[in-house]
Image: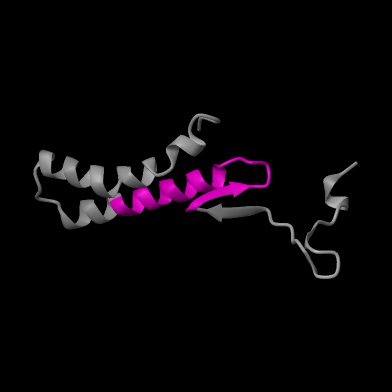
Amino acid sequence: MNTSEFTYYLGEVNDQIELERTSSMKDLCVVIDCKLKFEDHIKQKINKAYSMLGILRRNFKEMGVDSFNSLYKVFVRSHLQYAESVWNPHYMY
């Protein structure tokens, strides 16, 4: 039996609200799809990290390696590591 045939409700019998189906949802900035995978979350975080890296490369061309590494860890790596304990152990991409 396919689960798409079921309709779920929340609340008391006289005051029920029908729950709508979604293909993905965001909770604490972590995107989870209906199959409990994190592919969309990973894609969004990679795009954000590339965006931040581009900003750093454009605005800090003359910076030393140590300074650039510090900025990289703060502005780029932090996006990639956010909530990694949730999505990283399950699947590797």
Q: In the image, is residue 31 part of the stretch drawn in magenta?
A: yes
Q: Residue at x 50, y 33 (%)?
A: 93
Q: Position of residue 4 (x, y in %)?
A: 83, 50
Q: Residue at x 86, y 52 (%)?
A: 6
Q: Residue at x 74, y 61 (%)?
A: 20
Q: Position of residue 10 (x, y in %)?
A: 76, 60
Q: Residue at x 48, y 53 (%)?
A: 28
Q: Nearer the viewer, residue 40 or 58?
A: 40
| Image position of 80 (left or right of 13) | left
Determine which quarter of the picture holds residue 19: bottom right
Q: Does 46 sit above or below residue 13?
A: above
The total of numbered circles placed on residues is 0
Tell me the magenta residue range.
Answer: 28-52
Q: Position of residue 33 (x, y in %)?
A: 63, 47
- Residue at the far bottom: name it: 15
| Image position of 53 (left or right of 28) | left
Q: Does 10 sit above or below residue 46?
A: below
Q: In the image, is residue 62 part of the stretch drawn in magenta?
A: no
Colour theme: one colour
- Residue at the far right: name it: 1
Q: Quadrant of the N terminus?
A: top right
